[in-house]
Image: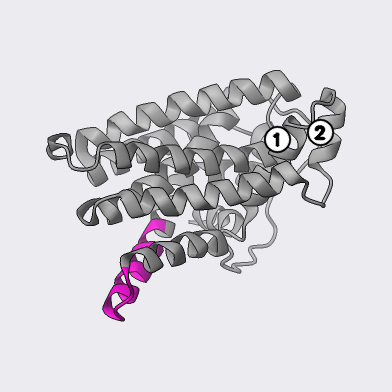
C-alpha cells in the first residue's frame, strides 16, 4: 500500500506527505504507475459526468477535462515536455542541452510544445465518439504512465543526479513485470483486444522516442520522461480518433 501511495504522491497533486522514504521504495512504486493512471482516468470520468449533468456542451467539457488533467498532475509532465523541447531543439552540444533543460525559464520551443500538446489533446478528445470517450480517458492515462516505466527500464540515465535518478538506480525487473502485467490486464479490460493492440503501438512509440532522446542526450532524464508521457497521451488519443466508429472496437 505504501508504494501505491508513493506513486500517487509522485504523479498527482494529492498531498499525502509520506515521510521516511528510501530510494528502493521510490523505485518499487513504479509498479503502481498504471493504477495511478487508472485512478486519474476515473477522476476525469467523474468530472465528465458532473459537467454533463450541469448541461455543459461537449467541446467545453473536453477543454475542462484537459485542463483538469494538467492541474491534477501538477503540470510536471508538461514542464518536462517544455524543458525537453527547449534542450533538444536548441541545436547545442549534449552538455549544453542538459544545462538548458535545467533552466527554470521556458524558451520559445518549450512554450510552443505545451500549447501544441494541449490543443492536440482537446481536438483529439473531442473527435473521439461519445461511446468511447470514457474508455479513451482511462486507456490514455493508464498507458502513458506505463510508458514512463517502460522507458526507465529500456534506457540509461543521462545525468549524475536528479529527481528521476532514484527510480533508475534501484529499479528491479520484478517492478517492471508487475507494472506491465497490470497494464496488460487494464488495457484488455478497458478495450479488449484493441486495448492490447494500442498498448503495443504505445510501446513502439515509447521506444522510438526514448531512442531518439538517448541519441541526443546520452540517456533519459526526468524531463524527458514527462515529455514521453505527454506525447504518448497524444498518440493514444490520435489512434482512438482514427479508429473511432469501426467494428474493431467490438473485438
Provide residue 207's location: percent of width, then percent of height: 52, 23
In this view, 80 is above or below 19: above
One can see residue 77 in this view: no
Q: Nearer the viewer, residue 27 or 112?
A: 112
Q: Nearer the viewer, residue 180 or 203?
A: 203
Mark 1–mark 2 CB contact (< 8 Å): yes
Q: Quadrant of residue 131?
A: bottom left
One can see residue 13 in this view: yes
In this view, 187 is above or below 153: below
- Considering the numbered disc 2 on the image, is that residue within a helix, a strand or a loop? helix
Per the image, the residue denoted by label 2 is 98
Instruction: Kindly report the distance in space between the C-alpha atoms of the residues bearing marks 1 and 2.
Output: 9 Å
Q: Is residue 109 left or right of residue 206?
A: right
Q: Which residues are magenta?
A: 41-57
Marks 1, 2: nearer the viewer: 2
Per the image, the residue denoted by label 1 is 221
- Crowd band around label 2 with a 10 angstrom C-alpha radius: few (<14), some (14–19), many (20+): many
Provide residue 55's location: percent of width, then percent of height: 29, 79
Specify whether residue 242 is painted magenta. Answer: no
Amino acid at each position: 500500500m505504501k508504494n501505491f501511495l508513493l506513486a500517487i504522491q509522485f504523479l498527482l497533486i494529492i498531498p499525502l506527505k509520506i515521510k521516511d522514504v528510501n530510494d528502493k521504495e521510490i523505485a518499487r512504486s513504479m509498479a503502481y504507475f498504471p493504477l495511478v493512471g487508472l485512478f486519474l482516468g476515473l477522476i476525469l470520468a467523474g468530472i465528465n459526468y458532473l459537467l454533463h449533468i450541469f448541461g455543459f456542451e461537449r467541446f467545453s467539457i473536453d477543454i475542462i477535462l484537459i485542463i483538469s488533467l494538467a492541474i491534477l498532475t501538477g503540470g510536471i509532465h508538461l514542464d518536462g515536455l517544455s524543458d525537453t523541447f527547449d534542450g533538444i531543439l536548441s541545436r547545442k552540444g549534449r552538455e549544453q542541452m542538459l544545462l538548458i533543460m535545467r533552466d527554470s525559464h521556458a524558451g520559445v520551443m518549450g512554450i510552443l510544445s505545451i500549447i501544441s500538446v494541449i490543443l492536440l489533446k482537446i481536438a483529439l478528445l473531442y473527435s473521439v465518439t461519445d461511446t468511447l470517450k470514457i474508455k479513451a480517458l482511462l486507456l490514455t492515462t493508464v498507458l502513458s504512465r506505463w510508458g514512463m516505466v517502460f522507458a526507465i527500464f529500456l534506457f540509461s540515465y543521462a545525468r549524475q543526479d536528479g529527481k528521476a535518478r532514484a527510480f533508475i538506480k534501484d529499479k528491479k525487473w520484478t517492478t517492471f513485470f508487475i507494472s506491465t502485467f497490470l497494464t496488460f490486464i487494464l488495457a484488455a479490460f478497458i478495450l479488449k483486444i484493441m486495448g492490447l493492440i494500442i498498448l503495443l503501438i504505445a510501446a513502439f512509440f515509447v521506444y522510438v522516442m526514448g531512442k531518439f532522446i538517448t541519441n541526443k542526450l546520452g540517456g533519459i532524464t526526468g524531463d524527458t520522461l514527462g515529455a514521453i508521457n505527454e506525447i504518448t497521451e497524444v498518440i493514444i488519443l490520435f489512434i482512438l480518433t482514427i479508429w473511432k466508429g469501426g467494428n474493431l472496437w467490438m473485438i
